[in-house]
Image: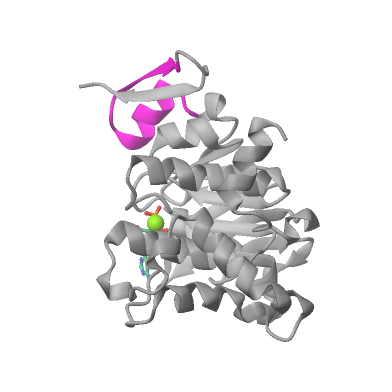
Amino acid sequence: MSRQQQEARAATGTGAVTDASARLALTATGLAVEIDGARLLEGVDFTAAPGRVHALIGPNGAGKSTLLAALAGDRATAAGTVLLDGTPVAQHAPKALARLRAVLTQEHMVSFPFPVREIVAMGRHPWAGTDAADDDDLAIEAAMAATDVSHLAARTVPSLSGGERARVALARIVAQRTPVLLLDEPTAALDLKHQEDVLRLARAHAAAGATVVVVLHDLNLAAAYADDVTLLRLGRVVATGAPAEVLTAERIEAVYGQPVDVVPHPRTGAPLVLPVR
Ligand code: ADP
Ligand code: MG
C-alpha cells in the first residue's frame, strides 16, 4: 500500500467511505436565493465534481453558507437550478437525499446532554431499514476514529470543548457515508493538527470518489488541499478555478480589503497567502 493510500485509509477509518464510488456531480446554474426580499445569491454558477475537493471562500456575509444550503437542498431558490446527479435537488425525496449528501452546518451542534456515540449514530438514520444498516456499528466506529473522538464516546456533548463538539458533529456526517459531503467551516474551532486532519479526511473522501464542498476561511488550507476554489463576494461568484488561478494578491486584496503577499510554498509550490503586516 502506498503512503497516500495509507493516509487515505487512516483519515477515513477503514471502510468509512462506502458509497463514494457512486460519483455524483452537483451543479448550480443561474442560482438566486432571496430572503425577505433581499438577494443573498445572484447568478451563481457552480460545479462540484466527484473525486474533487471544492473550497468555497469569501468574506463574512459573502453567501457561502447560503450557497451550501442551496446546494444541499435545504434552502429554497428564487431562480436557477441545483442538480444533484442530474436531478433537481428538491425532487429527491428527503430520505433519499440524506443518503446522497451529508451536510455539516455552521450551527451544527445539538446541545442536548446526549452521549457522543448517540449523536454520531444519528448519522445512520437515513440507512434504517436498508442493507447498509448492517454496517451501522462499523460506520460509527470508523467515523469516530477518523475525527479523533473515539475517546469521547461516552461523554455528553455539553461537557465537550468547542473543538471537540465540532469534531463530533463532523463524525456524525462522516458516519452518514454519503457520496456528497457539504461542510461549512469544519475547521473553524479546531487546533492546527485537527484542521489538517479534517482536510486530509476531505481529500481521502475525494480520493475514494466523493464530491466534497468545503467552506473555508483559511486561504492557505484552501490552497493546499482544494482542487477547485470558488470565491464569493456579495452573493456573486468573483472567480472559480484552480487555487493558483483564483488566489492572486490583487484579487484577494480587492475582495477582502486586506493587502496580502502571495508567495509559492517553498516545498510544495502551493500559493501561500500572507497578510501584509
Ligand atoms: P457567509 O456564510 O459567506 O458568511 P451567509 O450565506 O451566511 O454568508 O449570508 C450571506 C448574507 O445574507 C449575509 O449578509 C447575511 O447577513 C445575510 N443573511 C443570511 N440569512 C439571512 C436572513 N435569514 N435574512 C436576512 N439576511 C440574511
Ligand atoms: Mg457562513
Query: For residue 150, which quarter of the picture?
Result: bottom left
Q: Quadrant of ligand 1?
A: bottom left
- Is 259 in the magenta? yes
Residue 228 position, x and y percent, is 60, 37
Q: Is residue 2 left or right of residue 263?
A: right
Task: Write the residue at 42% across / 31% down.
Answer: 220
Please state if 18 lies on the left or on the right of 67 as rendered.
Answer: right
Residue at point 41% right, 23% down? 272
Q: Residue furthest left?
A: 277
Seen from the viewer's position, the closer of residues 142 and 26 is 142
Determine whether, in the image, residue 59 is placed left or right of residue 222: left
Which image quarter is the C terminus in? Answer: top left
Residue in view at x 43 percent, y 28 percent: 251
Can residue 69 be spotted in the picture?
Answer: no
Residue range in magenta is: 247-265
The location of residue 36, given as percent across then percent down, is 40, 73
Is 170 in front, or is 79? 170
Determine if the magenta segment contains residue 185: no
- The one nearer the camera, 230 or 51, is 51
The x, y position of residue 121, in whole percent, is 54, 76
Which image quarter is the N terminus in? top right
Q: Nearer the viewer, residue 10 or 43?
A: 10
